[in-house]
Amino acid sequence: MALTILRDTPTGLPLSELTARVENELTSSLTPEDRRWMPNHGKPRWEYTLAWALTTLKKEGRLDNPRRGFWRLASTPVDAPRTELAVRQ
């Protein structure tokens, strides 16, 4: 879902906007377990999973994180295996 949103926004998005758009797209499919607050991490489970998915996509060379809290598609993506987001689509 995050990749689709970022493909439609080539200049990238602040994390807060990306998170809001992902939540808007997934709102009907998020379960109570997905929405469970994780006190140690200060966010719901689905947001924690999204954060790790973004980090993994960055390590694979698919996303750039040019400054803190900002994400965009990598300008020259590598041919890496596709990462599946744990957040249900």
Image (cartoon, rainbow, N blue to C red):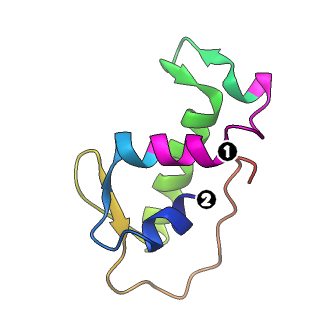
Q: Quadrant of residue 35?
A: top right
Q: Amino acid at mark 1?
A: Leu
Out of 57 and 30, give the one closest to the viewer. Answer: 30
The percent coordinates of residue 22 (x first, y second) are 55, 48
Q: Is residue 58 left or right of residue 29?
A: left
Q: What is the spatial separation of the Cα atoms under label 1 and label 2, in whole angstroms?
A: 8 Å
- Residue at figure coordinates x 54%, y 88% from the top left: 79
Q: Is residue 6 left or right of residue 86?
A: left
In the displayed orientation, state which residue is furthest to the left.
Answer: 67
Q: Quadrant of residue 30?
A: top right
The percent coordinates of residue 71 (x first, y second) are 34, 58
The stretch drawn in magenta includes residue 21: yes
* Most common SS among magenta residues: helix
Q: Residues within 10 Å of mark 1 (few under 14, many from 20)?
A: some
- Residue at figure coordinates x 65%, y 74% from the top left: 82
Tag nearer the camera, 1 or 2: 1
Q: Which residue is mark 1?
A: 26
Tell me the element at label 1: helix
Is residue 5 shown above or below 25? below
- The quadrant of the image that shows the C terminus is bottom right
Count of marks placed on residues? 2
Earlier sequence position, callout 1 versus callout 2: 2
Q: Is residue 7 left or right of residue 46?
A: left
- Residue at figure coordinates x 49%, y 47% from the top left: 21
The percent coordinates of residue 7 (x first, y second) are 46, 73
Q: Which residue is mark 2?
A: 1
Q: Which residues are magenta?
A: 19-33
Q: Are marks 1 and 2 in contact (CB under 8 Å)?
A: yes
The percent coordinates of residue 3 (x first, y second) are 53, 66
Q: Amino acid at mark 2?
A: Met
